[in-house]
Image (tube, coloured by chain):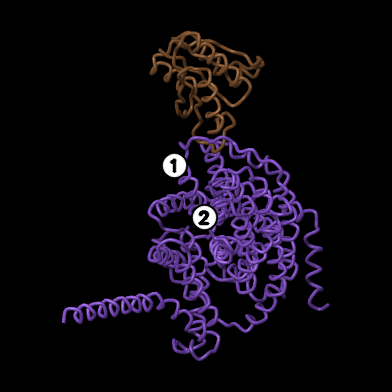
C-alpha cells in the first residue's frame, strides 16, 4: 500500500477536469501534427511551449506528453494511406502499410496499428510505474561527479546513436555545448561571449533555441515541398481488423511492446530506433520473411506498438535521472525547468502529484487516442487537404507570437529567427538539430556539476574514478567513445590478414 | 484536331466525359482527358486516382475513339492551366462539367466553369450531371 498510495493519488490529479481537458487537447494536437508530414512532435512542443506558461506544471506536462505520444498514433495514418510517413518513427510502417492499403486493407492496417499502439503504450506505462521508482531510489545517491559522468554519457550517446553522420552529430553537440556557456558564469560572475550585450548576459534561454531550430527551421524546410502535386484520397472502410488479422498480429504486438520499452529507456534511443528494430525482429522471426513488404500485418503491428512503447518509456530517464533521452524529451525537460520543476531523482518524492499525475495521464490519453483513431480517422485525413501555403504562415505567426510573449522581449523574437535560419541550414546540410538542443540542455547541467565536483574533489580530475558509480559511467563513456575506432582497426586487420592469406595462397600456387 | 475534357472524380465529371466521348465519336477526333491536380496540399478530392483515369480511358477506347490522358498540375489558377492546355493542343472543342453553385457561393469563391466559358477562345460544351 505504501507504494500504491501515491500512484492512486496520481489518478486524482488526472481526473481533475482541467487536467482531463488539457490531456484531450494534447492528444488531439499530437494526432493532428502526427498526420501532417513535416511538423514533428519536437517542433510542435517547442512552438506550444509559451502556451504552457500560464498553467500548473502538471497540467502543462500532461499536455506536452500527450502531444508526444499522440503524434505516434497520427504518424501511421499518412504512412498507410499516402506512403508519406507523418513522423520519422512511422517510416517502416510504409513498407507493409501502404501495400495493405493498395490491397484494400487500409482499414485493417490502421485498426491494428491503433490497437497495437494502445497495447504497446499501456504495457510501457505499467513498466514505467514499477521501474521508475527503482531507478529514482538508485539515483538518490548521485552526487555532482555522478551527474557529470551521466551528462557526458548522455551527450555522447545521443551524438553517436542518433541517425545521420556521427561527425555531424558530434559537431552539432559541440555547438550546443558552446551555446550553453554564453552568459554570466554562475560561479565567478565573469561574462562569457556576451560582447557587452545586456540581453546575452543572462545566457540564451532554452525556449528561443528550441522554437527556432525545430519550429521555424522545419516550417522553412517544409515550404520547399509546397509544389508537390496532390494525390487522390484513399477510401478507408471497416477499420475494425478481422479476427484473423488480430491473431496474426498479436505476437508482433507483444514483441514490439517489450522491445520498444527497453529501447525507449536508452539515451539516444526512442521511438524511431524502436520501430526500426521491431520491423527487423519481425522479419527475422517470421516463418515466411518474403511476405514482408507485400502487406504483412506484422510489419505494421510490431513497429507501431514499439514506437508507442518507446515514446512512453523515454520518460523514465527524464523523470528519474533528469537526463533527457532524445530531442523531444529535451524540450519537455526545458518546459519543466520553466515551470520551476527540476526533474531528477527527488522529483518522485518531492512532487509525487506531478510525477504520478503525468504517468497516469498517459492511460487516459491512450484511451482517448484509441477512441479518436478508430472512428475518427476520416476527419483527420481531411487535414491533409490544407495546403502548405496556408499552414506555414499560421504556424510561423503562432511561433513568433509565442516567442514574444515569453518575456515581452523583441530580442527573443530575433533569436528565434536567427536559430530558425540556422535550423534550416542545418537540415539542408544534413545536420540533425536534436544533438544540438540536447547538448545545450545538458551543457549547463554538465558545467555546473563538473565545477561543483571539482570543488569537492579539490581540483583532482582522477577523483571521478574513486567513486564507483561515476567510475563505471566514465568507463562506459570511454568505451562508447573509443569503440568505433577500435572496431574500425579490427575490421581493417581482418581485411588485411585476409588479403595477406589470399596473397600467400597465390604465392603457393605460383610456386 | 482534338477534343479536350476536364475530368474530376464525381458525377459531374463522369457526365462531362460521357458527353465528350459521344462528341468525339461524332466528329471522329482524338479525346484528351485532363485531370489537373493542385500543388501544395497532400490530398485533394478533385484529383483522380490511377484506377479512375484507367477506367475513363478504357470507356473511351471501348467507344472506338482515340483517347489519351494528359498529366497536369496547377499552382493557383486552374482555368489558366486548363485553357493553356487547350491552346497547346489546338483543340476544336472544350468539354467541361457544370455544378449547381449558389449566388453567394459563386460570389465568394468564384467559379472555374464560368471563367472557362467566358475566357476560352475555343467552343465550349458545358454539361450538367444527369
Q: Single out the mark in the foreground, 1 or 2.
A: 1
Residue A16 placement, left or right of B61:
right
Work out whether A76 lies above or below A155: above
- Residue found at the far bottom of this picture: A466
Residue marked by disc 2: A208
- Residue found at the far right of this picture: A1
Residue A326 pos. (x, y %): 54, 64
Q: Which chain is brown?
A: B
- Marks 1/2: CA distance? 23 Å
Q: Specify the colour of chain A.
A: purple
Identify the residue shown where x is 61% and y is 66%: A260
CB-based contact (under 8 Å), mark 1 and mark 2 = no
Quadrant position of residue A266: bottom right
Judging depth in this view, the residue of B12 and A430 nearest the camera is B12
Judging depth in this view, the residue of A471 and A505 nearest the camera is A505
On whether disc 1 and disc 2 are found on a single subunit, the reply is yes
Work out whether A479 lies above or below A59: below
Quadrant (top left/top right/bottom left/bottom right) for the N terminus of chain A = bottom right
Quadrant position of residue A377: top right
Residue A480 placement, left or right of A53:
left
Quadrant position of residue A10: bottom right
Residue A309 pos. (x, y %): 64, 63
Say what secondary structure mark 1 lies in: helix
Chain ID, mark 2: A
Chain ID, mark 1: A
Say what secondary structure mark 2 lies in: helix
Which of the labelled discs sits on residue A224, or is there none? 1
Judging depth in this view, the residue of A13 and A378 nearest the camera is A378
Mark sitting earlier along the chain (1/2): 2
Amino acid at each position: 500500500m505504501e507504494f500504491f498510495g501515491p500512484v492512486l493519488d496520481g489518478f486524482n490529479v488526472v481526473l481533475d477536469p482541467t487536467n482531463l481537458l488539457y490531456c484531450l487537447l494534447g492528444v488531439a494536437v499530437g494526432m493532428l501534427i502526427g498526420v501532417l508530414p513535416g511538423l514533428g512532435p519536437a517542433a510542435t512542443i517547442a512552438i506550444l511551449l509559451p502556451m504552457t506558461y500560464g498553467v500548473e506544471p502538471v497540467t502543462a506536462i500532461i499536455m506536452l506528453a500527450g502531444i508526444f505520444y499522440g503524434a505516434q498514433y497520427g504518424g501511421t495514418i499518412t504512412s498507410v494511406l499516402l506512403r508519406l510517413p507523418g513522423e520519422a518513427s512511422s517510416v517502416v510502417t510504409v513498407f507493409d502499410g501502404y501495400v495493405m492499403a493498395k490491397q484494400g486493407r487500409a482499414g485493417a492496417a490502421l485498426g491494428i496499428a491503433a490497437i497495437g499502439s494502445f497495447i504497446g503504450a499501456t504495457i510501457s506505462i505499467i513498466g514505467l510505474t514499477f521501474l521508475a521508482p527503482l531507478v529514482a531510489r538508485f539515483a538518490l545517491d548521485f552526487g555532482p561527479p555522478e551527474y557529470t559522468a551521466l551528462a557526458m554519457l548522455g551527450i555522447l550517446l545521443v551524438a553517436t546513436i542518433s541517425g545521420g553522420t556521427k561527425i555531424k552529430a558530434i559537431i552539432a553537440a559541440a555547438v550546443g555545448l558552446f551555446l550553453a556557456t554564453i552568459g554570466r558564469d554562475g560561479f565567478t560572475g565573469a561574462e562569457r561571449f556576451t560582447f557587452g550585450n545586456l540581453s546575452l548576459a543572462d545566457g540564451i534561454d532554452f525556449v528561443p533555441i528550441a522554437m527556432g531550430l525545430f519550429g521555424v527551421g522545419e516550417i522553412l524546410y517544409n515550404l520547399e515541398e509546397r509544389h508537390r502535386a496532390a494525390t487522390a484520397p484513399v477510401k478507408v472502410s471497416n477499420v475494425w481488423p478481422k479476427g484473423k488479422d488480430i491473431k496474426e498480429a498479436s505476437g508482433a504486438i507483444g514483441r514490439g511492446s517489450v522491445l520498444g520499452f527497453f529501447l525507449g529507456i536508452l539515451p539516444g534511443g526512442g521511438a524511431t530506433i524502436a520501430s526500426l528494430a521491431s520491423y527487423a525482429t519481425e522479419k527475422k522471426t517470421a516463418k515466411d520473411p518474403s511476405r514482408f513488404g507485400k502487406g504483412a500485418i506484422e510489419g505494421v503491428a510490431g513497429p507501431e506498438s514499439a514506437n508507442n512503447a518507446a515514446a512512453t518509456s523515454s520518460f523514465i530517464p527524464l523523470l528519474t535521472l533528469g537526463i533527457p533521452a532524445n530531442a523531444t524529451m529535451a524540450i519537455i525537460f526545458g518546459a519543466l525547468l520553466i515551470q520551476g520543476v527540476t526533474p531528477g531523482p527527488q522529483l518522485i518524492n518531492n512532487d509525487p502529484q506531478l510525477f504520478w499525475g503525468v504517468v497516469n495521464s498517459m492511460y487516459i490519453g491512450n484511451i482517448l487516442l484509441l477512441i479518436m483513431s478508430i472512428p475518427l480517422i476520416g476527419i483527420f485525413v481531411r487535414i491533409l487537404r490544407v495546403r502548405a501555403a496556408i499552414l506555414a504562415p499560421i504556424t510561423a505567426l503562432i511561433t513568433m507570437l509565442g516567442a514574444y510573449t515569453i518575456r515581452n522581449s523583441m530580442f527573443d523574437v530575433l533569436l528565434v529567427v536567427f536559430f530558425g535560419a540556422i535550423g534550416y541550414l542545418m537540415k539542408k546540410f544534413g545536420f540533425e538539430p536534436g544533438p544540438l538542443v540536447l547538448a545545450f540542455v545538458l551543457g549547463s547541467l554538465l558545467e555546473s556539476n563538473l565545477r561543483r565536483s571539482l570543488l569537492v574533489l579539490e581540483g583532482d580530475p582522477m577523483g571521478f574514478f574513486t567513486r564507483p558509480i561515476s567510475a563505471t559511467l566514465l568507463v562506459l563513456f570511454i568505451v562508447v567513445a573509443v569503440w568505433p575506432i577500435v572496431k574500425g582497426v579490427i575490421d581493417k586487420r581482418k581485411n588485411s590478414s585476409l588479403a595477406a592469406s589470399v596473397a600467400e595462397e597465390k604465392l603457393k600456387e605460383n610456386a | 484536331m482534338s477534343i479536350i475534357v476536364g475530368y474530376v472524380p464525381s458525377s459531374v465529371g463522369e457526365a462531362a466525359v460521357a458527353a465528350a466521348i459521344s462528341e468525339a465519336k461524332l466528329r471522329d477526333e482524338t479525346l484528351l482527358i485532363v485531370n489537373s491536380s493542385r500543388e501544395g496540399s497532400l490530398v485533394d478530392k478533385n484529383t483522380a486516382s490511377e484506377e479512375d483515369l484507367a477506367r475513363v480511358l478504357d470507356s473511351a477506347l471501348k467507344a472506338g475513339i482515340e483517347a489519351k490522358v494528359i498529366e497536369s498540375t496547377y499552382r493557383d489558377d486552374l482555368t489558366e492551366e486548363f485553357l493553356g492546355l487547350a491552346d497547346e493542343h489546338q483543340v476544336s472543342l472544350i468539354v467541361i462539367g457544370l455544378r449547381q453553385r449558389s449566388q453567394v457561393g459563386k460570389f465568394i469563391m468564384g467559379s472555374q466553369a464560368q471563367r472557362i466559358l467566358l475566357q476560352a477562345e475555343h467552343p465550349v460544351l458545358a454539361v450538367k450531371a444527369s
